[in-house]
């Protein structure tokens, strides 16, 4: 991993927070963190659980864990104590790294953190993986996913072969959390390897993101999720932004209305990326030429079997008990519906495989219903699920009523496709990665 992440001169700037952090400073901080981890009992072959918000402390302790030859267990800092305790009991790390002081406010992208390291167990890591992550949990309980050092290195190299990624000397305006795969590999690890500056905005707001783009003259790519696209689409720039090259989004399907609003406002490509925690980036369309289709990433093979997308994955990515039908014989069953064009190889993701339901003997694709509802005027977010009938949970902007919403849907969808139940929410529940939650019990709780 050192050959991948610690390339470059000591004077090369790798992070701007907003003060520049060069490679020499980062190497020193990693060495200091490695000493603290060793004093607390971390050894090669052990594991360190990192429960830190995005911060310089997080980056230093993550890289120090790997330099020690240990496994990094990434725990989102927004998890509850109960969720963290469950993960710690299951994974048994040798040390836990958590904040002893933090500042800067809840809306900061990068937080000023002083990290504390405490001993937890004397057990070796339960698997040979370099990193353990929890899936986003947008459709149910999180899965425990492991990736080896070789797998992470291969993904970093995969990024270097994708046309349209930020190039050496350019910047990534980093919005997704580095605890999760898009921010971790597509942001942090790729940036450190390729010589791309990572520039998180000071705060999570449209104005702050645009200020980060305008802060320097070098080309900038905004990396985020659909939630961030909507934020920027509703923000008016103070002036021209010649530095902005594109925005790249991952995480979930982007409603056409949101994509169009962004490109109309900024006039730059809105790139699309499809990936999973289990394998990282699977396919991209960084110029927005094939939306919603994507091209498989270099080294990745995608197949369609009975309407489901399968992705090449040499080893089982799951740690501990897991659904045995999710991975077999080198193929990950994504549980996503989609098609692969036999002539072009382009892949179109159509949503979750379980979005197909039967109403009165007629097949209905809930993804189609959801896309229709999400594209209606006054709707800012929507999730459509099967809950004893088609049910739409909708976050509205302004004075949209259920009666008006029902009328708009009736104009656009056949009667058998229309939601039986409409529920208007002030705020849709989201995962820690910004994905809309699709768990029926969680949606019911939010609506009540």
Image: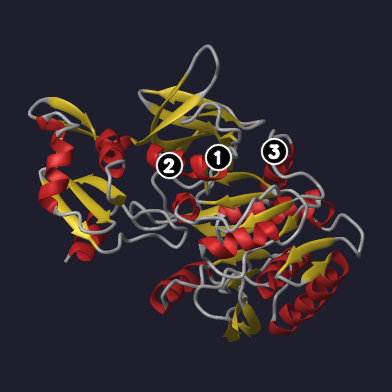
Residue ID for mark 1 = 270
Q: Left or right: 81 with respect to 8? A: left
From the viewer's perspective, is residue 112 above or below residue 438? below
Q: Position of residue 212 (x, y in %)?
A: 66, 61
Q: Which mark is residue 38?
A: none
At mark 2, the secondary structure is: loop
Which quadrant holds the N terminus?
A: bottom right
Within 10 Å of the Cα at label 2, are there few (<14), some (14-19), or many (20+) other Cα atoms? many
At mark 3, the secondary structure is: helix
Question: How was the colour assigned to the protein in this rendering?
Answer: secondary structure
From the viewer's perspective, is residue 15 above or below residue 435? below
> Residue 38's quadrant in the figure?
bottom right
Q: Left or right: 16 with respect to 102? A: right
Question: Looking at the image, is mark 3 or mark 2 nearer the viewer?
Answer: 2
Which quadrant holds the C terminus?
A: bottom left
Which residue does the image show at 45% across and 38% down from the upper left? Answer: 260
Q: Is residue 178 visible?
A: no
Residue ID for mark 2 = 254
At mark 1, the secondary structure is: strand
Residue ID for mark 3 = 158
Q: Residue furthest front?
A: 239
Mark toward the start of the polypeptide (3 vs 1): 3
Q: Position of residue 370 (x, y in %)?
A: 27, 41
Front one among 29 and 142 = 29
């Amino acid at each position: 991993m050192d050959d991948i992440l610690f390339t470059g001169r000591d004077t090369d700037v790798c992070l701007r927070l907003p003060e520049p952090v060069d490679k020499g400073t980062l190497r020193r901080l990693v060495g200091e963190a490695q000493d603290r981890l060793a004093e607390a009992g971390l050894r090669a072959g052990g594991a360190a659980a990192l429960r830190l918000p995005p911060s310089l402390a997080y980056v230093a302790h993550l890289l120090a864990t790997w330099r020690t030859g240990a496994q990094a267990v990434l725990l989102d800092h927004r998890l509850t104590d109960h969720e963290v305790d469950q993960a710690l009991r299951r994974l048994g790390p040798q040390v836990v790294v958590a904040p002893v002081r933090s500042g800067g406010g809840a809306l900061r992208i990068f937080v000023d953190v002083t990290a504390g390291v405490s001993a937890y167990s004397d057990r070796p890591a339960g698997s040979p993986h370099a990193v353990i992550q929890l899936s986003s949990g947008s459709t149910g309980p999180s899965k425990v996913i492991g990736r080896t050092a070789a797998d992470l290195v291969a993904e970093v190299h995969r990024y270097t072969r994708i046309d349209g990624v930020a190039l050496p000397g350019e910047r990534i305006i980093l919005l997704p959390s580095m605890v999760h795969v898009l921010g971790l590999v597509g942001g942090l690890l790729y940036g450190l390897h390729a010589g791309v500056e990572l520039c998180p905005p000071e705060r999570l707001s449209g104005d702050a993101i645009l200020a980060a783009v305008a802060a320097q003259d070098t080309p900038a790519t905004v990396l985020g999720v659909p939630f961030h696209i909507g934020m920027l689409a509703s923000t008016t720039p103070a002036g021209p932004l010649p530095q902005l090259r594109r925005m790249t989004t991952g995480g979930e399907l982007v409603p056409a209305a949101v994509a169009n609003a962004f490109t109309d406002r900024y006039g730059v490509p809105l790139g699309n990326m499809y990936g999973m925690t289990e394998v990282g980036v699977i396919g991209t369309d960084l110029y927005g030429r094939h939306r919603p289709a994507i091209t498989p990433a270099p080294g990745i093979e995608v197949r369609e079997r009975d309407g489901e997308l399968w992705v090449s994955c040499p080893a089982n990515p799951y740690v501990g008990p897991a659904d045995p039908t999710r991975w077999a014989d080198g193929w990950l069953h994504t549980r996503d519906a989609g098609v692969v064009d036999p002539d072009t190889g382009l892949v179109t993701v159509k949503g979750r495989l379980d979005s197909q339901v039967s109403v009165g003997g007629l097949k209905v694709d809930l993804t189609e219903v959801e896309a229709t509802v999400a594209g209606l005027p006054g709707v800012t977010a929507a999730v459509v699920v099967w809950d004893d009938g088609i049910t739409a949970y909708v976050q509205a902007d302004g004075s949209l009523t259920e009666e008006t919403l029902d009328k708009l849907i009736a104009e656009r969808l056949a009667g058998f496709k229309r939601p039986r139940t409409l529920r208007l929410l002030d705020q849709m529940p989201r995962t820690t990665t910004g994905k809309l939650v699709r768990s029926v019990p969680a949606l019911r709780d939010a609506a009540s």
